[in-house]
Image: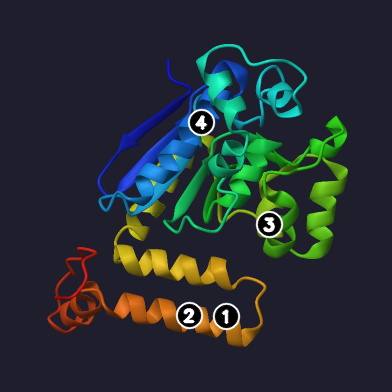
Amino acid sequence: MSHLLIERLEGVALVTFNRPEKRNALSPEMVVKLAAFWDEVARDDDVRAIVVTGAGDQAFSAGGDMGSLIPLMMRTRPPQGEWEERFSADRKVLGRALLRGSQFFKPVISAINGHAHAGGAEFVLATDLRVMASNATLAVTEVRRGLIASGGSLVRMPRQVPWAHAMELLMLGEPVSAERAHAMGLVNWVVPQGQVLAKALEVASKVSLGAPVALEKTKEVMVRSSGLPLEEAFAIETQCTKENAAMEDAKEGPRAFMEKRPPVFRGRRSA
């Protein structure tokens, strides 16, 4: 079975980490395929939102596989087989798989069906909206393995939650409950485990009602302007506003509102 499953629904792509017997630990195959998926879906106009979850009922993802991915990252053993060879030929693919960059602007929703630890927690921080099972936990455990969380968490965490919460998660390396993660502001919704995917797909469906370019430009402004002085941030907002105004959807939305009908968004530039 593939370590990464991809299903396209109406306006939504569903991605599943598919190693339940390994607590969905990130393997070289999973990382290489996930990085390729982001490149592909960025160009797919039919997909307006992405939902990512884990197979089974134990874990969203336990992070990097200690038997394969981590040794290859640390160069403590040579690669074996096609996927390890491909990963070792370009170790930066891990950063791309974890969206450790600022160029992917489609909305991503995490359906945290089980424990999200180490790299699994780091991936959660790369997503935009988060649904978490009430019995799941979240933990950034790298310091207890002699490592640091280099998948983006050291930068993202203090931008997403207050400093004291960020330091607690990154320095202690201890799991926090779904209730505590919600109180910290790390997740949007906490639901019973059996309802996680349904809730995430419901959220994705609502997101996909938005105009595709407007959705992407909204996220682009938020990502690109983060941490910048106001004048630079407003310049990015102005640029993206102008680019969105050139789309047919920017005319269709107000017109549909006035005509009291649902808008039909196509993501095309005006003639």
CB-based contact (under 8 Å), mark 1 and mark 2:
yes
Provide the residue designation for mark 1.
233
253 or 105: nearer the eye?
Answer: 105
Q: CA distance from mark 1 to mark 3?
A: 18 Å
Q: CA distance from mark 4 to mark 3?
A: 22 Å
Q: Dot 2: within a 10 Å radius of its alpha carbon, few (fewer than 14), some, or many (20 or more) residues?
A: some
CB-based contact (under 8 Å), mark 1 and mark 4:
no
Q: Quadrant of the N terminus?
A: top left
Find numbered disc 1 in the image and state the secondary structure of the residue it sits on. helix
Provide the residue designation for mark 3.
156
Find numbered disc 3 in the image and state the secondary structure of the residue it sits on. helix
Q: Position of residue 72 (x, y in %)?
A: 69, 23
CB-based contact (under 8 Å), mark 2 and mark 3:
no
Which label sits in the foreground, 2 or 3?
A: 2
Find numbered disc 2 in the image and state the secondary structure of the residue it sits on. helix
- Which of the two labelled residues, at mark 4 and mark 2, occupies the earlier sequence position? 4
Find residue 237 and name its label.
2
> In the image, is 157 to the left or to the right of 92?
right
- Which of the two labelled residues, at mark 2 and mark 3, occupies the earlier sequence position? 3
- What count of labels does the image hold? 4
Provide the residue designation for mark 4.
32
Give, as a three-letter code, the residue at label 1: Ala
